[in-house]
Structure formats: C-alpha cells, structure tokens
Amino acid sequence: MTFLLQSKRDATKFQILVEVASHQPNVRQSEIAHTLGITPQAVSEYLKELTNQGFVYSDGRVRYKTTTKGVEWITEHAFSLRRYARFILEEVVSQVAVWTAIADEPLQAGTQIYLYMRDGLLYASAKHETGATGKVISDVQKGRDIGVTDLRGLIDLPDVKIVIGKVPRVHRGGSTAVNYQMLKKLVEADRFIAVIGVEALIALKNIGIDADVMFGAKEAVVEAAWHGVSSFVLSVDDELPSLLKRLEAEGLEYELHDLKA
C-alpha cells in the first residue's frame, strides 16, 4: 500500500502541497482550509512543517511556492497513488462482488480469512493476519482457487525493486562481451527475470538461467511491479531508452548496470 495512505498527517501535507502548487503564488491559507475541510490554524502549522522540510518557501508576505524538492515529492507520491489506484480498479473493482484468491490452507465456507499478496498473487488464510479480511464462499482445499466476499481493509502491496542490466548488440560484441561475474551477482533467484534481445537471452543461458519472459518483456515488468513483484531485466543497449521511458511513465524506480566487459 502506498505510504501516504498509512499516515493521515502525510496525506494532509500532500494535499496542502498540491493546493499550493496549483494556485501559487497567490494562495490563501483560508482557501486551502476550506478546500480540505480543516482549520486555517492547522494549515499554518502544516505549511511551517513543509517549509522546514524544504518543500515550499515563502517570500515573507504569506505567498507560498513549491520548491523543486516539493515538486519531486508530489510526483513521487502521485505515481505511487496511481499505481495503487490502478491495482484497485483492475483487481478490486472489477471483481467487487467476489474476489478470487488462492487458499493457503483448507478453508470452510463462511470462514473469515485474511488476504495478502505473495509472488504477485492474492492469497487467503485464516491464520496469516493482515489488514484486509473477507469471507470464503465455499469449502476449499489448500492451493485451490476460492471466492471471497465481504471485503474489509486494504491489501498491502510489497515494495518492488527493478534491476536492469545492459548488454551490447552483436556488432559490438553481443554475449561474448558481457561481464559475467557482475551478471551472476545481479541475478537473484526470487526475482521475475525478463530479457530484451537475443544477445541478452544467450548471455543468461551462458550462466545457466532461463528467462521468465522475452516477448512483451517491457509490459510484463510493469505488470509485475503493479502486483508487487520485483524484476531483473537484461536488455540490449539500443532497447534501453524505450524500456526506461516506459518505467518512468509509471513512476517505477530502477537500478541500471552496464555489463559490457
């Protein structure tokens, strides 16, 4: 779950900062208070805190503007909220009557269960306590799909890490010009592995690893991130710009490593 939704104070600061950014420099504390339904005194205290954090500055005449740091903070959390909203719209609202989960142990109809994500899939358990609950609609054995109704709470999405390795195209050496020692260190068994380009595919095979996906790899990495799954992407160098542009459009952070030997 996005950080802002875990803290009412941070959520309010985010809203105030957005109001400042959208109405600067002639923004009045009373107008912000009216928009957000809080007192002007509360807005004043939040603005002092935002100023101390370097997110806004004032010219001394009660005229506030967002700083570059403040804009970056808005952008970071806006992307996080968008990812969470997309998860809700695609995985929750579309199945609002009955969700589909995987039973983590045998369950009986009517049992109250807890819901959580694991390896990108939704699981239900009567033992694994989380902030999201529901009731199963039928008896089920462990590992089977089960319908869940009467949903309450929010399902936490794990933080994701996307690591990207860059390898050269064949006319620049291809898989023969890869730093395999570094590649072995970057690849982790518990990550979703994607490759872009034949050179990247062969480089992975040379260390005994098969990719999970090659065709549609860019979208697959984004989809995995929306479901809380971390990825390792091995890509040929001339495909990197479009991959990075796609990740940045979704507000997804990444690490980039040049693996040319």
Image (tube, rainbow, N blue to C red):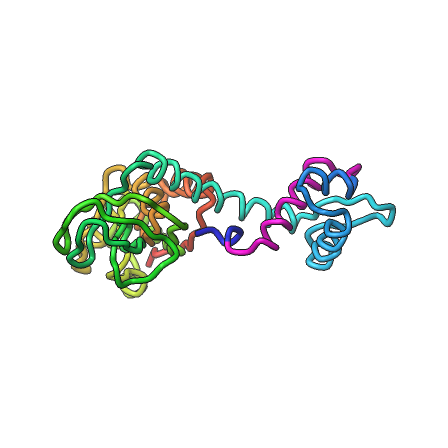
Quadrant including the C terminus: bottom left
Label tally = 0
Residue found at the far left of this picture: 141
Instruction: Please tell me which residue lies in front, 67 or 135.
Output: 135
Determine whether, in the image, residue 29 is placed left or right of residue 218.
right
**Residue 218 at what x, y percent from top left?**
33, 40
Residue found at the far right of this picture: 61
**Residue 226 at what x, y percent from top left?**
36, 45
Q: Is residue 257 visible?
A: no
Determine whether, in the image, residue 205 is placed left or right of residue 85.
left
The answer to which image quadrant residue 204 occupies is: bottom left
Residue at 14% of width from left, 51% of height from top?
A: 140
In the rendered structure, which segment of residues is drawn in magenta? 6-27
Q: Magenta stretch: residue 239 in it?
A: no
**Residue 58 at what x, y percent from top left?**
80, 49
Residue found at the far top of this picture: 94
The answer to which image quadrant residue 105 occupies is: bottom left
Determine whether, in the image, residue 8 is placed left or right of residue 177.
right
Instruction: Please tell me which residue lies in front, 160 or 208.
Output: 160
Q: Is residue 18 visible?
A: yes
Residue at 19% of width from left, 60% of height from top?
A: 207
The answer to which image quadrant residue 125 occupies is: bottom left
Provide the major secondary structure of the magenta segment.
helix
**Residue 65 at what x, y percent from top left?**
74, 44
